[in-house]
Structure formats: structure tokens, C-alpha cells
Image (spheres, helix red, strand yellow):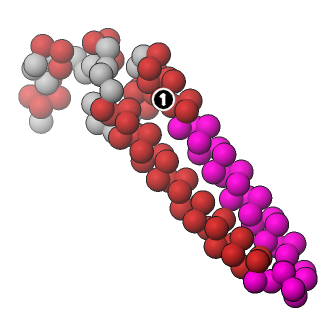
Amino acid sequence: MKPFNQRLRTASHTHTEVVRRYELARTLVEFLAAVMFIIGSVFFFYESLTYAGTWLFVVGSVLFAVRPTIRLMLELHLARLPVPKEFLPLGLETGLDVTESTK
């Protein structure tokens, strides 16, 4: 199946477990990015910590860039997993893709 299909998230127990793991990773990355920005902001109140605060902002920004990367990896992983027949489009399980014939 194609990536970015919401039905894939619950197509099987394996699909659901994969989604759970990626969502946990994404949540941890978001939390760490937020913590980096908060600590970096506090560091900017002290001139001696400005350099460290700048690095915390850079690391936080990288973590925010990792977030959509995790989402893309999830979608590609789900698209590669085998899908039970009841989740396949009509006719696809027999090799006849009805969506192609209606174009």
C-alpha cells in the first residue's frame, strides 16, 4: 500500500505496535527539543552562559528537524509491512486493481 494512508495505522497488531514505537520516539524528541529551548532561554539571562544557550538552541532546532523525519520513517515502514486482505482495496487481493480500471 502507499505511504500516508491512515488505514495502515490499524491494519494489524504489527502495524499498531510499529506506530506506537515511532510515536514514542517522536514524543521523546519533541520533549527533548522543548527542554533544550527552555534551558537555552534561561541561559540567555546570564552572559557567561550565552554560548552554551546558543548550542542548546542549535541542538533543539536539530531535534525539531528530526520530528518530521521520524514521521516519514514511520510511513515508509508501514507501507512495507504486509497488509491483511480486508484492508486491501477491492480487487487488489486478486491482482485486479479496480482503481486502475476506473481512470
Q: In the image, what residue type sits under mark 1?
A: Val
Q: Is residue 38 left or right of residue 91?
A: right
Depth order, front residue of 102/80: 80
Q: Quadrant of residue 52?
A: bottom right
Residue shown at the point (59%, 42%) measured from the top left? 25
Query: What residue is pinned by disc 1?
Result: 18
Number of callouts in the render?
1
Up the image or down, 39 lies above or below 24; here it is below
Residue 40, given in percent of the width and then of the height, sits at: 79, 71
Does 27 appear above or below 80?
A: below
Residue reaching furthest to the right: 46
State the image quarter where residue 6 is shown. Answer: top left
Give the secondary structure at mark 1: helix
- Residue found at the very far bottom of the displayed protein: 47
Q: Locate residue 50 relative to residue 89 in the image: left or right.
A: right
> In this view of the protein, which residue sits in the foreground, 95 or 17?
17
Magenta region: 22-51
Residue 16 location (% of width, % of height): 50, 23
Please identify the quarter of the rendering in which residue 42 is found. bottom right
Identified at 35% across, 40% down, the residue is 76
Dot 1, crowdedness within 10 Å: few (<14), some or many (≥20)? some
Q: Is residue 55 left or right of residue 99?
A: right
Q: Quadrant of the N terminus?
A: top left
| Residue beneath the point at 42% across and 45% down | 73
Q: Is residue 42 magenta?
A: yes
Q: Position of residue 84 (x, y in %)?
A: 32, 14
Q: Is residue 30 above or below residue 85?
A: below
Instruction: State whether the magenta stretch is mostly helix, strand or loop.
Output: helix
Q: Is residue 26 magenta?
A: yes
Q: Is residue 42 left or right of residue 64?
A: right
Q: Position of residue 65 (x, y in %)?
A: 54, 62
